[in-house]
Image: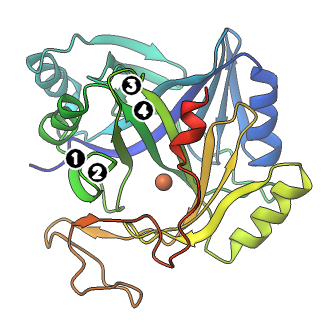
Amino acid sequence: MAPKVFRLVYAGFKSAQPEKMVEYYRDIQGMNVTEEVDGATFLSFGFDHHNVGIYPADTKGLQNIAYQVDPEVGLDNLQKDIEEFGISVERKALPGIEEALVFNDPSGVEIHLFTDIEQPATGFTWSGLEIYKLGHIALRVQNFDDTMKFYTEVLGFYQTDKIGEHFANFITCNYEHHVINFIAAEPEQATQLHHIAYQIKDSSHHTKAADWLFKHDYDTIWGPQRHTAGSNIAAYHLDPDEHVVELYADIDVYIPELNMMEPREWHQELPYRPKMWEGLSAWGTEYDFDLGGYVDEK
Ligand SMILES: [Fe+2]
């Protein structure tokens, strides 16, 4: 089954300090504010109506995640499939979107699915981190098995790699190694953002990005280093709400027809097919804290 969605488009954050989050995404990342609706601010990397939404709230955390639906599948068919899985779905107009399916996935995350989003092409900026796009989101999830089943069997995501059995499960709806990474939560842990990843131009851009962040009092907390699963060169920092933000380049290209990654000289085995990895870092530069620790402290 081909994936029924083909692109991760945006993520929304609730925040008790929305002005600081907007300032970070506008001035540090370099996004354009495209619209403000009912106190929420929507920002674009340069093409879509928005790739990040900031919603004022009493707490902080992930508010929603959105994917674009294959027009040949259509919203009617997809709604039926989701409802057959036992999830109730609403249809709504949303900022920049005429009609979307809105529901909570089995982990409890609010998901928006649509075939069309306004693309005002606001233009990429030449300041800040100069991000190309929202690349992937890692989540620690309740109902891990049902969540994996929903994404792979209902939405048709491909599973690429794993690190351990439940630590990290990488899935994709397009040619990129992963657009989502699910980590199984312990029974007492809530579903929560683990990290959110944005694509920078290339790995040489990491230096400029780290200098820019440091200049504005954002320390790089890990990296740059090459990951095992996905081979991305990744560096991490914290946004004003202390969400872990990854900047990456060079992520693996997945070829579903061949069930393998496009070959690269740094691959440890050829062909590199979806597999289970034991560690996070290909260079032996394992970090001495669990990134999930930032999640647990909240
Ligand atoms: Fe990541």
From the viewer's perspective, tell me whether residue 23 is left or right of residue 70.
right
Q: Amino acid at mark 3?
A: His
Q: What's the distance in space between the residues labelled 1 and 3, CA to CA?
A: 16 Å
Point out the frontmost of discs 1 and 3.
Answer: 1
- Residue wearing tag 1: 157
Q: Secondary structure at mark 3?
A: strand
Separation of marks 4 and 1 at Cα, in angstroms: 14 Å
Q: Would the CB of label 3 be found within 8 Å of ligand 1?
A: no
First in sequence: mark 3 vs mark 2: 3
Q: Are marks 3 and 2 in contact (CB under 8 Å)?
A: no
Image spot of residue 205 (x, y percent): 70, 71
Q: Which residue is mark 3?
A: 112
For marks 2 and 1 on the same chain, the one whose residue lies earlier in the sequence: 1
User: Which comes sooner in the sequence, label 1 or label 3?
Assistant: 3
Q: Of the numbered discs in the image, which one, if any, rests on residue 171?
A: 2
Residue designated by label 4: 66
